[in-house]
Image (cartoon, rainbow, N blue to C red):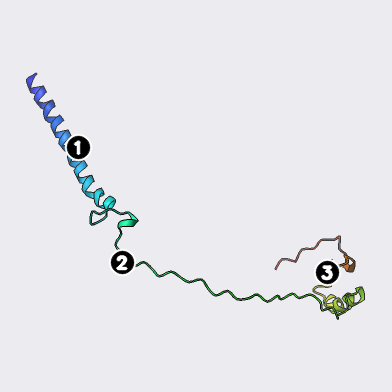
């Protein structure tokens, strides 16, 4: 019986020493990461001012936008159905777009200036 107790005590002491050794190794590895390499801590207030970070990138210069779509000048005539039909006559004569559908309307009055089978929807052919 005495032999069993001494064996149990030996294993208990060995286990306790093993746990202490593991904790010591973990502390040696983790402690510098938590406190910084100099032991002063890793908070922003204690970081060294000798190492400069990258310089800030300045904002690009902002230019002025010029409109590409401009309204008609007051001296110009408003588009008419005959004028739209005349402008579309040449493109519609092209066999590749001759089956064009759609409509053109006056944005001010809402009047329809040209129609080409508007109820029929079309999709471009696959390439």
Circle 1 — which element? helix
Disc 1 target residue:
19
Question: Label for residue 100?
Answer: 3
Q: Note whether 11 is above or below 35 in the view shown.
A: above
Question: Label for residue 51?
Answer: 2
Q: Nearer the viewer, residue 9 or 62?
A: 62
Q: Give the alpha-carbon distance from disc 3 to disc 2, as whole Å.
A: 67 Å
- Structural crowding at the residue carrying mark 2, measured as other residues with C-alpha within 10 Å and reported as few (<14), some (14–19) or many (≥20): few
Q: Note whether 57 is above or below 3 in the view shown.
A: below
Residue 71 in the image: x percent, y percent? 79, 75
Assess whether mark 1 and mark 2 are in contact (beta carbons under 8 angstroms): no
* Residue at the spot 28% in from the left edge and 50% down from the top edge: 34
Q: Nearer the viewer, residue 79 or 50?
A: 50
Q: Give the alpha-carbon distance from disc 1 to disc 3, as whole Å.
A: 84 Å
Q: Is residue 49 left or right of residue 58?
A: left
Q: Nearer the viewer, residue 71 or 2?
A: 71
């Amino acid at each position: 019986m005495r032999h069993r107790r001494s064996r149990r005590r030996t294993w208990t002491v060995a286990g306790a020493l093993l746990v202490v050794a593991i904790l010591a190794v973990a502390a040696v590895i983790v402690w510098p990461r938590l406190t910084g390499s100099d032991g002063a801590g890793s908070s922003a207030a204690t970081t060294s001012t000798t190492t400069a970070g990258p310089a800030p990138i300045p904002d690009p210069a902002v230019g002025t936008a010029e409109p590409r779509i401009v309204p008609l000048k007051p001296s110009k005539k408003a588009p008419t159905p005959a004028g739209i039909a005349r402008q579309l006559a040449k493109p519609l004569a092209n066999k590749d777009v001759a089956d064009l559908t759609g409509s053109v309307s006056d944005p001010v009055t809402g009047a329809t200036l040209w129609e080409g089978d508007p109820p029929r929807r079309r999709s471009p052919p696959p390439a």
